[in-house]
Image: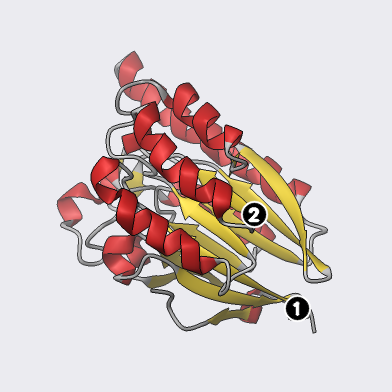
């Protein structure tokens, strides 16, 4: 029975101070997982030299690494440089894109994008008013469209995962002040998820949020390290399971 072990983490906030922790985590994870998925905020301030701290460990991990960027990675407006550093180390950075990976006799498809803000029922940003506000709405719309295209592209993969930074559901935000939920994600991202029903959705960003939630029948996990309390959390997916019920939690790593 083909199974894939996914080591997931978000909000690692790499910089010189965190290098020892990151090196230690990546030196061990290759024995516990088949692939690493990183849910954004890879750096502390979006400095390419901070990205190099993470890239150095990713280059030595020995298993595939896929990532999306987060808001911290955009902070200095050098996201393209951050991405190049990571890609030079072999990391596949997904930005409104998708990728597949052959593992253990099956194929894993990953649809990835940072996502953006917008809110949830009861508090949502509208597509109305000042042009700058409408541009925020449009920016989120571009992520929704990309997620739809990515999930459509990997529909034939036996295993399918959505990788985000911002949350597509309120269910993993409990613990954060409700007054800031609008800036932690948006349920506009849940349309493609409900339509295509991937096995698993992973995100970060909400440091005080809740680990486990759902979009309809699809399990969603907030893998920010502040929430899991671990450098990685491992999920095992069974490619013979007919739907998202194939997702299984394994023992947390480190």
Q: Is residue 124 left or right of residue 191?
A: left
Which residue in the structure is indicated by mark 2?
A: 64
Helix, strand or loop at label 2? It is: loop
Mark 1 lies on a secondary structure that is loop
Q: Position of residue 254 (x, y in %)?
A: 38, 74
Residue 210 visible from this viewpoint: no
Answer with mark 1 or mark 2, whichever residue precedes in sequence.
2
Question: On the image, which quarter does residue 6 sit in?
Answer: bottom right
**Gap between marks 1 and 2, in whole Å?**
25 Å
Query: Residue extending furthest top?
Result: 131
Please name the residue shown 78% across and 71% down the image: 104
Foreground of the two, 36 or 143: 36
Q: Nearer the viewer, residue 94 or 54?
A: 54
Residue at 54%, 53% in the rendered image: 163
Q: Position of residue 211 (x, y in %)?
A: 35, 71
Residue at 20% in and 66% down: 175
Other-residue count near label 2 (Cα within 10 Å), few / some / many at <14 / 14–19 / ≥20: some
Give x and y (percent) for residue 92. 62, 42
CB within 8 Å, label 1 to label 2:
no
Q: Position of residue 111 (x, y in %)?
A: 63, 49
Q: Quadrant of residue 228?
A: bottom left
Mark nearer the viewer, 1 or 2: 2
Q: Is residue 70 something one can see in this rendering?
A: yes
Left or right of 169: which side holds 66?
right
Q: How is the image coloured?
A: secondary structure
The numbered dot on residue 242 is: 1
User: Residue at image x 57%, y 39%?
Assistant: 89
Q: Quadrant of the N terminus?
A: bottom right
């Amino acid at each position: 029975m083909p199974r894939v072990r996914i080591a997931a983490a978000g909000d690692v906030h790499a910089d010189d101070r965190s290098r020892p922790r990151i090196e230690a985590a990546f030196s061990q994870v290759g024995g516990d997982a088949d692939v690493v998925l990183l849910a954004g905020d890879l750096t502390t301030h979006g400095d390419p030299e901070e990205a190099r701290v993470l890239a150095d460990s990713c280059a030595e991990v020995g298993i595939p690494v896929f990532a999306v960027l987060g808001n911290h990675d955009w902070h200095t407006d050098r996201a393209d440089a951050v991405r190049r550093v990571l890609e030079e180390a072999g990391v596949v950075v997904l930005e409104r894109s998708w990728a597949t990976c052959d593992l253990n006799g099956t194929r894993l498809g990953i649809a990835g994008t940072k996502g953006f803000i917008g809110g949830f029922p009861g508090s949502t940003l509208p597509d109305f008013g000042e042009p700058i506000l409408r541009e925020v709405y449009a920016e989120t719309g571009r992520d929704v469209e990309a997620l739809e295209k990515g999930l459509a592209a990997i529909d034939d993969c036996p295993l399918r995962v959505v990788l985000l930074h911002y949350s597509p559901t309120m269910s993993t935000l409990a613990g954060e002040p409700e007054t800031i939920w609008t800036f932690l994600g948006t349920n506009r991202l849940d349309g493609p998820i409900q339509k295509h029903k991937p096995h698993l959705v992973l995100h970060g960003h909400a440091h005080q949020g809740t680990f486990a939630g759902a979009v309809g029948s699809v399990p969603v996990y907030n893998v920010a390290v502040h929430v899991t309390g671990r450098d990685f959390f491992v999920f095992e997916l069974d490619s013979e399971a007919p739907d998202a019920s194939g997702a299984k939690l394994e023992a947390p790593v480190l």
